Amino acid sequence: MKRIRITTDAGSGLFWLVSALLVCYGASQLGLGSATDPGSGFIFFWSGLTLALLALVLIASPTADTNAADRQVIGTDWRKVLLVLA
């Protein structure tokens, strides 16, 4: 029997899943409406649902058999980071 460890990816995925479910709940309280006549919470509901889907992907990804050394970042090229920020 294999024991599954909760990694930081799974922990942050769980945080985002709970946040997404709260967004969906709040949006449903505002009123969803329909596709042709959207209510106040329509876009928030679908945004929360998309976030929940991405969080589930994040939670499921560490359970795959990957070596932690394969995912380790070797170094950061600060010139590229500063170029993107500029």
Image (cartoon, grey):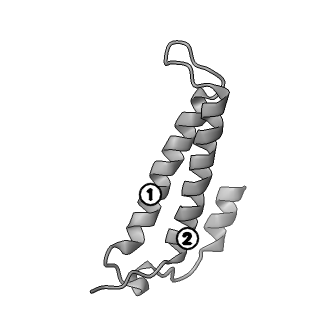
Q: Secondary structure at mark 1?
A: helix
Name the image quarter holding the C terminus: bottom right
The residue drawn where x is 51% and y is 18% is 34
Q: Is residue 23 above or below residue 59?
A: above
Q: Is residue 22 above or below residue 8?
A: above
CA separation in Å, label 2 and label 1: 11 Å
* Residue visible at 65% across and 69% down in the picture: 79
Which element carries disc 2, helix, strand or loop? helix
Q: Nearer the viewer, residue 21 or 44?
A: 21
Find residue 65 and report its horizontal and vertical position in percent: 31, 78
Image spot of residue 32 (x, y percent):
57, 25
Seen from the viewer's position, the closer of residues 67 and 33 is 33
The N terminus: image quadrant: bottom left
Q: Amino acid at mark 2?
A: Gly
Q: Position of residue 18 (x, y in %)?
A: 58, 56
Which numbered circle lies on residue 56? 1
Taking the spot 53% from the left edge, 48% from the top edge, the residue there is 51
**Residue underneath mark 2:** 11
Residue placed at 44% from the left, 82% from the top?
5
Query: How dense is the environment of label 1, judged by Cα within 10 Å: few (below 14), some, or many (20 and up)?
Result: some
Residue 56 found in image quarter: bottom left
The disc, 2 or 1, on the residue closer to the chain's N-terminal end is: 2
- Which amino acid does the dot numbered 1 rest on? Leu
